[in-house]
Amino acid sequence: MAPAVLRMAVQERQLYAWALRLRALVRALETLPEAPDAVVCDTPPHIGAYTEAALHAADLTIAPVPALAGSLQGFGDLRAAWTEMQDGRKGELAAVVNLWDGRTGATNRAMEEAIGQLSARVLSTKIPRAEAINQAALSHALLFDHAATHPAAGMFHELAAEVWAIAKAVRP
């Protein structure tokens, strides 16, 4: 697992200067003594060199899409970049809706429909808007350490199982 960290911003400028930047992740993975079952890359929330390299290498791309109207533009931009970086490969793009609020049914349905119109799978697991998630992030802690019994932690377990099932199906 490769988590996004702030120091990546400096390294990203260096990566842009490298002519083979799209192959950076693929080349790094080729150096491993044994091929992993899966690689999870958490990229910064913008389309930069790291994100492009991850999109290029990915068999499956999962994009978190907040249940907010403005997030659809960002997802549309990501989809366009994903299509370009896939360069004819047959990867899959899926969206996981987060900041889900069960009280806003019309908004939720409109979001899922709009994501679907962007030709992407919408995962069935929804990550709720939850104070426990915010508090864990503010504490620089994992939700599972901060509030392991919170229902949101269970949703992340469900999400992991759903993603793993899809990843096994799309992996060449």
Image (cartoon, grey):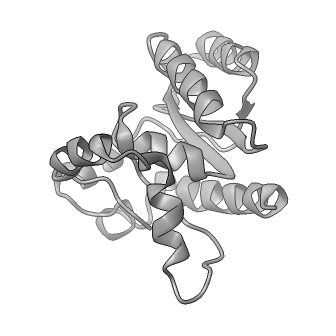
Q: On the rendered image, what quadrant is the C terminus found in?
A: bottom right
- The image shows residue 164 at horizontal and vertical percentages of 70, 63
* Residue drawn where x is 55% and y is 43% of the image: 55
Question: Against 49, is 114 above or below?
Answer: above
Q: On the rendered image, what quadrant is the N terminus found in?
A: bottom left
Q: In this view, does 100 lie to the left or right of 3?
A: right
Along the viewing direction, whichever of 100 and 70 lies nearer the viewer: 70
Question: Against 54, is 79 above or below?
Answer: above
Q: Is residue 74 left or right of residue 112?
A: left
- The image shows residue 51 at horizontal and vertical percentages of 43, 42
Along the viewing direction, whichever of 40 and 28 lies nearer the viewer: 28
- The image shows residue 106 at horizontal and vertical percentages of 65, 10
* Residue drawn where x is 79% and y is 43% of the image: 90
Res 146 seen here: yes
Res 103 seen here: no
Question: Against 97, is 72 above or below?
Answer: above
* Residue drawn where x is 66% and y is 11% of the image: 110
- Numbered-mark total: 0
- The image shows residue 74 at horizontal and vertical percentages of 46, 19
Along the viewing direction, whichever of 89 and 155 lies nearer the viewer: 89
Q: Is residue 165 left or right of residue 70?
A: right
* Residue drawn where x is 44% and y is 11% of the image: 70
Q: Is residue 98 left or right of residue 19?
A: right
